[in-house]
Image (cartoon, rainbow, N blue to C red):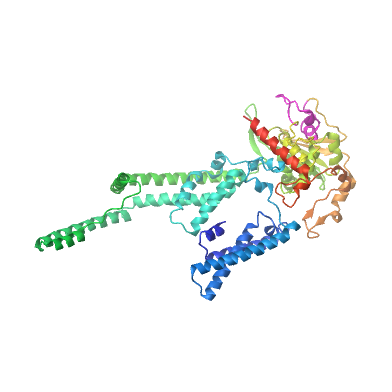
Amino acid sequence: VHAIFLVLIGRFSVKLYWSYTLFYAIGTLGAIQIPVVGLTPLKSLEQIGPLGVFGVMQLLYAVNVYCRVKKISDPDQVFKLRVQAFSLGAGVAAAVAASLYPTGYFGPLSSRVRGLFVQHTRTGNPLVDSVAEHQPASANAYYQYLYSACYLAPIGFVRIFFGLHDSKYFLGLYGAIAYFFSAKMVRLIILLGPVASALSGVAVALLFEWAVDQLNFFSSSASAETDGEEEDDSKNETSDDAKAGAKKADGSKKAAAKKKAAVAAPAPEKGPLGPEFDAFLGQAKVSYEKNRAPRRVFAVFLVYVIVIRGADFFRYCQQMAMAMSNPSIMFNAQLRDGTKVLVDDYREAYFWLRDNTPEDSRVMAWWDYGYQITGIANRTTIADGNTWNHEHIATLGRCLVSEEKTAHRMIRHLADYVLVWSGGGGDDLAKMPHIARIANSVYSTVCDGDPLCSQLGYLDRKGTPSPFMAKSLLYKLHSGNQRPGVTVEKSRFTNVFNSKFNKVRIWKVEKVDEESKRWVADPANRICDPPGSWICKGQYPPGFLKYIKDRKDFAQLEDFNARKSDDKEALEYQKKYHESMEKRQRQRP
């Protein structure tokens, strides 16, 4: 963005050309060596913009070289050459794009990127809409993560517009763009951190330099005052000499006219706000120059504030660093009787899996906990935060929200254990509406045509579940054998672990299909690119395929490679989804 901005305002240079060319070439060549990245930087619309800037740089440099060789310096002629070069480049680019478009070469914008330009929960993708970190940032979030930089960075942002040059353009663009996107999505405040620090440094330097200048008794201001006094004395002496010469001169009108022209002072320029404001401004400047003592007092106070607030900011940063680096699966809490306890349920559950289950065990849980199960329990999980397959996440959701008997028939082909978060707060029951919506986006029978699955929830304040919720496997594994009337069939699932504060429950899947388990574990059934690597396309065992035959791949709004005119069902789903979300928003107070 910075590079193309400099080009647009006419600040293209050889230095800019080489800086961007080397940056893009080396960075892209390095990125495409990573198998999971591949040619994505050259195919995805989210990343193809830098390629366009790279092309612009090459055209501009080629024109510059041509003009230097041909010794062309006329601006009009140079402009015509650039127009011709860009016309040719645009034609070639259009021809290449037109030839690649029918092949599906270009990847669409993802829902996450689309969520940066539309209101949260309006992307049309229930999976993206379910993530809390995709919500807009609040003022409290900015203060929590930036602290004093919230107030200093805007001062630095304004300051950089005085005496602009390339590096200041960079800070300004970076700050404006980072703030825009962080305001759209709270997780992107991390992008604002570096530029907020830089702009805060500009503000602190500005204030500190002014304060030091006031405290320096031999500063340039004092020298300026001395120079002013000497200049006044010189003017007075010159004026006296002129008067003496005038008395001796012949009193002719011609001599008087010459004298008048010589000593006449130029009329002061009038300001745009009128003579009254000019007079006020002049008086303010005089008053500012005379009152050095108050300025020095304020400068001492300002230095004191900078030092104190700087030390406070350092302490706050250390506290935040420790808080964010500490394990989030352990935290302090207070019981109803006031007793302070350490809630260690999550680590306890993962250690139990590690120590009490076979190494080849597969654990089914909602994707949020996938990394923790893999990293701490060292067990295979069905999905995690890097699972980009929308249909697979929907299949996982369908297993959890289906009735117990139907769910068991599917899960026995995929997992040996099922882990659920319970205990209130943000547990799996709180996430269940989102889980059902995601499942319904691929399996339309999950919620019988209701894209928001509004029939899922509680009927009253006593926590009475709706019929849909009461029959679901997730509700039974969450509350089974703990709430009156909620039971789990032992021939299907056996409760093998409950954490100390009931935050995590683990259930063993009975009657696991061993044939499906062996098929999945067989390396011959893995499709890997390159062969033998860990980058393998997921496949379901043959025995499970009958349960996903009604699956319909989710149609992304952004996928222009898909023919939406041929999929009326997908269009109808998106229409109903957005209408339902808007209706729900209007009903909220």
Nearer-the-camera pick, 76 or 277: 76
Q: Which residue extends farthest right?
A: 515
The quadrant of the image that shows the N terminus is bottom right
Is residue 32 visible from the viewing direction of this image? no
**Residue at the image position 82 percent from the left and 48 percent from the top:** 360
Front in this rendered view, residue 105 or 348: 105
Magenta residue check for 459: yes
- Verify whether residue 139 appears in magenta: no
Q: Which residues are magenta?
A: 456-483
| Front position in the image: 140 or 477 | 140
Residue 450 position (above or below residue 324): above
The mark tally for this picture is 0
Q: Position of residue 589 (x, y in %)?
A: 62, 29
Q: Residue at x 55, y 42 (%)?
A: 142
**Left or right: 299, with 509 as reference point:** left
Compared across the picture, whether 455 is left or right of 214 comes to: right
Q: Is residue 65 above or below residue 464?
A: below
Q: Quadrant of residue 426?
A: top right
Visible residue check, residue 385: yes
- Tell me where residue 553 appears, x and y as whole percent: 78, 46
Q: Residue furthest bottom?
A: 70
x then y, percent, for residue 204: 45, 49
Horizontally, residue 230 falls left or right of residue 403, namely: left
